[in-house]
Image: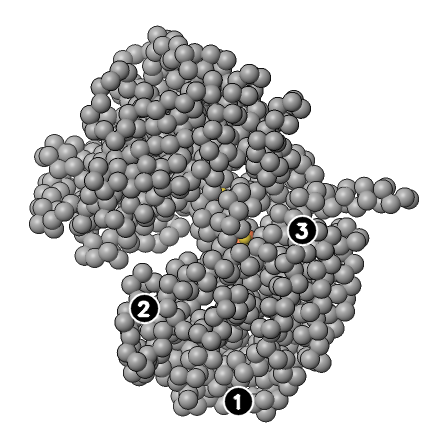
């Protein structure tokens, strides 16, 4: 078979898989009202129908209907989607866009063009054991850089993009925290911790892979805050990566393997709740029941697992422990009317994690928590619910769009006059750091995880 | 297919970013919010200026290429579906607020400006642009003008047509006309402004519009009233208006709607009621607003309302409005296809119309829920169905034909605010008569002798036979 024939065969197989796997019921459910468009960051940036949720669904349906081929433009449009799923909560018809996107990405991954696919597929093969066994964590930063490079390779042949790519990589390198090879377990010295005061339940900590390497401190603080709140905490040893990075790039089989392992180890640990402090991971975890829906013996346990998953803010808010905190200095204000603050109050703002908000639907938690903290003037970020452009590894593979988006986020930050931007997901945290760096505001604006800020202010 | 000569010409004018004829662009401009309607254009263009629009129209006119002007494509009548192919002219890049004139209380805008965004800008200055079609979060002002969009505030404040006072438009010949101006009085010749509003892109492309603004009301109050008897609800509506009170919002939901909304949202709606009214009054002074609200409460009470709830604050008001706001989204979740119509009758005939709709739904064994703007008689019978079930869709079509028939019999119209487009073109003659159609065609001919502007809209190839003609 010559390469032309091979290519035709690949395209045919891609099309067939899309026709077979795209959920036609969901495609039909979209009534094309367009109500999702104002929520979509890529539509906002481009103004193009094709770069909107309604447009992407129409493209998918056109492929399923045989009206168009899943060509390169189709693939690019799907790649440009952040997967932030801001289009879901606003949809009157309750279209499961995330699932349609997954089905599409699955097919694109499976039948990717060889040239583009090798780095990505090879990388997955190389990355899988590391993510899975959660060891040799120092390699994480290597992997992140490898992703960067894969992005670079895939984009390099689009000559005009080369101009800004290296600059972007430099920024990424500068803002990347130093990896801590010890992880939370070594840092806090153990896998089990007792609740302080009255016990209200047992929490299993999902430590996350990126989280545990690059943000060990946040995991340490999470454990402290949970025990202070009255939870026994366990950190099951054999837990693996949530699988989001794999799932979002279309490698659902690997994601499933990870899911099963997590369902099993947290099931064995007999916990009441599973704490997530990374919106991106949490969103993956709460959808394990959907991920494993086709595997009869796993659905039940996966569903049980999914309902136990809670964002850290929600767990902290369930405790009575924080009710006696002195009143927060100023109640939340919108950016339009920032309050003049006392000298010792810190003005902070909050950038939503899309997955926490749109998938876990727990976006209010961090805000409520922030309102409890003394000496804190919490100012809402205008459009804080809009994706910051991080979206998993999006900022690595679609740097231009990601930069455009983060720059517009920074404009809103300026209006809040905040000196600290808080986030609840490591990806968002890094992306906002990119924003601060691009804005040359490192000396004025800090970026922190909500958990770390809360711990710093409360536990001192 | 666009002939190469035209293609090259447009490419040279607009560049490859703003002239598109690849599959992605064609597919994503082949639909609007109208169910079961899709048709690919041959090209999509994104002009930046009036002179580019002129160039495009001149070229299309010379080569007899259909032109479909497009805003956000959120209309429900098939208005922006390129049913005859041709060039879609997407106006979304011309989206500036050109001027807010606080001396004359007017705003001048480009047609691609988002309606909601415009509201926000205007409200920042303490001013008010009342037209609020449900799609305003995505719709454009140009689209609103072309479709003559209405909204919840129609009764008290009027609709788009009452606010547009000046236009700049490009004719198919490429000539530019300006109509009206920052003028509240202007009787110089035929009122071309009003003629263009609601012309559905069949006459010209609007490139600039001047609208009037009013001072924003400062106070608002909300209440929800439930009735066991639909006629009592209808009588209350008539008596409220009869007493000289014009509420800002006077929304209605029938029993099938109440049941579905409650079943899905559990917001405490009384499902044994035949009708629910949502009433809002606004104004400059709380005393006068309160007086109106008191009068409304006593009228509804006299008419035997089973339940009257008044919101004490913004949050409670929001909660009450949620019942009405979630009507469409709830209905949309029940089955894959949702067909939303807008038959409209004189206010005094609402109860008759709603009961007729319920009867017709039963007769054709369909699920049709009715909600809408009781104050102005503009109802939204909404059918939940499945486009793939051809037999059922056939029944849906028959049912809606009967509904339009009934609306006209009651002195109403086939469309109150959605427009004719392709969807209601077969029924237009029922409303305006043969002579009316002939006159409208004459007007169309005068503007667009070659018939390039949004062909297939408003005028049907073949009108539907009307079975009973009684008045
Ligand atoms: S809001 Fe939902 S139904 Fe409407 S266009 Fe978007 S995805 Fe489709
Ligand atoms: S997931 Fe985010 S980027 Fe993708 S279509 Fe939805 S809103 Fe737009």
Q: How many other residues sit within 10 Å of disc 3, few (<14), some (14-19) or many (≥20)?
A: few
Callout 1 secondary element:
strand
Above-or-below relation of A297 to B257: below
Is label 3 in a helix, a strand or a loop?
A: helix
- B265 vs B10, nearest the viewer: B10
A2 is higher (above) or lower (below) than A437 = above
Q: Is mark 2 within 8 Å of ligand 2?
A: no
Q: Tell whether circle 3 marks a residue whose Cβ is less than 8 angstroms from ligand 2.
A: no
Measuring from the top left, give residue B303's x and y in whole percent: 13, 39
On whether disc 3 and disc 2 are found on a single subunit, the reply is: yes
Q: Would you say the residues marked 3 and 2 are in contact, meaning their CB atoms lie under 8 Å apart?
A: no
Q: Which mark is residue B380?
A: none
- From mark 1 to mark 2, how far is it between C-alphas? 34 Å
- CA separation, marks 3 and 1? 54 Å
As drawn, the label of residue A160 is 3
Crowding at mark 1 (Cα within 10 Å: few <14, some 14-19, many 20+): some
Mark 3–mark 2 Cα distance, whole angstroms, equals: 44 Å
- Point out the tag, 3 or 1, that comes first from the N-terminus: 3
Q: In the rendered image, which residue does mark 1 sit on? A: A193
Instruction: Please tell me in which quadrant of the rendered image residue B203 appears.
Output: top left
Q: Which residue is mark 2?
A: A332
Q: Residue at x 47, y 17 (%)?
A: B173
Q: Chain of mark 3?
A: A
Q: Quadrant of residue B215?
A: top left
Q: Nearer the viewer, mark 3 or mark 2?
A: 3
A120, A19: nearer the viewer: A120
Point out the image quarter for the C terminus of chain B.
Answer: top left
Residue A101 point in image, percent of width and height: 61, 51
- Horizontal side, residue B81 vs residue A396: left or right: left
Q: Secondary structure at mark 2?
A: strand
């Amino acid at each position: 078979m010559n390469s032309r024939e091979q290519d035709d065969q690949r395209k045919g197989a891609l099309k067939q898989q899309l026709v077979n796997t795209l959920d036609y019921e969901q495609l039909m459910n979209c009534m094309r009202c367009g109500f999702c468009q104002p929520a979509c960051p890529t539509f906002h940036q481009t103004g193009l129908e094709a770069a909107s949720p309604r447009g992407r669904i129409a493209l998918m349906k056109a492929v399923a209907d045989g009206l168009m081929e899943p060509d390169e433009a189709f693939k690019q449009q799907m790649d440009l989607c952040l997967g932030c799923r801001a289009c879901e909560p606003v949809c009157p018809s309750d279209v499961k866009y995330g699932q349609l996107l997954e089905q599409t990405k699955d097919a694109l991954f499976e039948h990717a063009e060889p040239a583009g696919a090798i780095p990505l597929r090879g990388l997955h093969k190389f990355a899988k054991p590391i993510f899975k066994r959660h060891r040799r964590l120092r390699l994480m930063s290597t992997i992140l850089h490898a992703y960067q490079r894969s992005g670079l390779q895939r984009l390099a042949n689009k000559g005009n993009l080369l101009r800004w790519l290296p600059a972007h990589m430099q920024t990424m390198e500068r803002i990347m925290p130093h990896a801590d090879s010890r992880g939370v377990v070594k840092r806090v010295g153990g896998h089990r911790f007792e609740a302080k005061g009255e016990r209200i339940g047992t929490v299993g900590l999902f430590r996350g892979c990126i989280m545990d390497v690059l943000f060990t401190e946040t995991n340490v603080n999470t454990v402290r805050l949970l025990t202070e709140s009255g939870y026994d905490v366990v950190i099951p040893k054999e837990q693996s990566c949530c699988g989001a990075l794999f799932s979002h790039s279309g490698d659902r089989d690997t994601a499933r393997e990870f899911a099963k392992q997590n369902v099993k180890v947290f099931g064995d640990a007999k916990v009441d709740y599973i704490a997530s402090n990374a919106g991106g991971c949490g969103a993956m975890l709460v959808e394990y029941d959907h991920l494993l829906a086709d595997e009869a013996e796993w659905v039940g346990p996966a569903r049980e697992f999914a309902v136990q998953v809670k964002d850290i803010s929600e767990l902290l808010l369930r405790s009575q422990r924080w009710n006696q905190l002195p009143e927060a200095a100023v109640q939340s204000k919108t950016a339009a009317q920032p309050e003049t603050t006392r000298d010792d109050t810190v003005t902070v703002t909050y950038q939503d994690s899309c997955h926490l908000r749109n998938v876990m639907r727990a976006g209010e938690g961090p805000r409520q928590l922030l309102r409890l903290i003394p000496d804190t003037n919490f100012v809402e970020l205008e459009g804080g619910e809009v994706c910051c452009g991080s979206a998993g590894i999006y900022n690595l593979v679609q740097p231009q769009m990601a930069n455009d988006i983060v720059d517009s986020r920074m404009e809103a930050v300026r209006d809040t006059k905040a000196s600290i931007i808080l986030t609840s997901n490591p990806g968002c945290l890094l992306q906002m750091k990119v924003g601060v760096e691009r804005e040359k505001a490192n000396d004025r604006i800090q970026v922190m995880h909500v958990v770390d800020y809360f711990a710093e202010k409360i536990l001192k | 297919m666009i002939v190469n000569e035209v293609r090259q010409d447009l490419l040279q004018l607009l560049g490859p970013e703003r002239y598109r004829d690849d599959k992605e662009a064609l597919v994503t401009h082949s639909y609007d919010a109208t169910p079961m309607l899709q048709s690919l254009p041959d090209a999509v263009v994104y002009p930046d200026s009036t002179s580019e629009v002129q160039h495009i129209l001149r070229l299309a006119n010379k080569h007899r290429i259909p032109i479909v002007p497009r805003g956000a494509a959120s209309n429900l009548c098939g208005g922006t579906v390129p049913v005859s192919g041709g060039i879609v002219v997407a106006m979304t890049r011309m989206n500036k607020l050109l001027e807010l004139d606080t001396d004359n209380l007017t705003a001048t805008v480009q047609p691609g400006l988002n309606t909601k965004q415009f509201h926000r800008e205007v409200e920042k200055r303490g001013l008010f642009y009342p037209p609020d079609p449900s799609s305003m979060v995505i719709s454009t002002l140009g689209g609103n003008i072309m479709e003559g969009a209405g909204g919840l505030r129609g009764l008290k404040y009027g609709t788009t047509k009452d606010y547009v006072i000046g236009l700049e438009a490009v004719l198919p010949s490429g000539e530019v006309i300006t109509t009206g101006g920052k003028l509240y009085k202007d009787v110089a010749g035929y009122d071309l402004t009003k003629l263009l509003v609601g012309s559905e892109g069949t006459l010209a492309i609007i490139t600039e519009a001047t609208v009037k603004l009013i001072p924003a009301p400062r106070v608002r109050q909300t209440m929800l009233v439930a009735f066991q008897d639909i006629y009592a609800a209808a009588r209350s509506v008539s008596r409220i208006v009869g007493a000289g009170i014009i509420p800002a919002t006077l929304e209605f939901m029938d029993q099938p709607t109440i049941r579905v909304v409650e079943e899905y949202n559990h917001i405490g709606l009384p499902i044994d009621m035949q009708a629910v009214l949502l009433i809002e009054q606004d104004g400059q002074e709380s005393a006068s607003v309160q007086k109106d609200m008191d009068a409304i409460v006593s009228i509804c009470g006299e008419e035997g309302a089973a339940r009257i709830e008044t919101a004490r604050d913004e949050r409670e008001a929001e909660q009450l409005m949620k019942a009405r706001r979630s009507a469409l989204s709830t209905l949309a979740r029940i089955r894959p296809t949702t067909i939303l119509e807008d038959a409209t009758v004189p206010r005094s005939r609402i109860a008759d119309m709603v009961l007729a709709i319920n009867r017709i739904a039963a007769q054709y064994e369909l699920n049709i829920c009715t909600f809408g703007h009781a104050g102005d008689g503009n109802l939204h019978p909404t059918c939940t169905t499945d486009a793939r079930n051809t037999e059922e869709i056939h029944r849906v079509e028959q049912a809606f034909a009967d509904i339009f028939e009934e609306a006209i019999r009651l002195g109403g119209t086939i469309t109150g605010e959605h427009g004719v487009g392709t969807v209601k073109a077969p029924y237009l003659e029922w409303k305006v008569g043969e002579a009316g159609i002939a006159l409208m065609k004459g007007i169309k001919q005068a503007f667009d002798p070659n018939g390039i502007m949004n062909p297939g809209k408003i005028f049907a190839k073949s009108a539907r036979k009307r079975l009973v003609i009684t008045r």
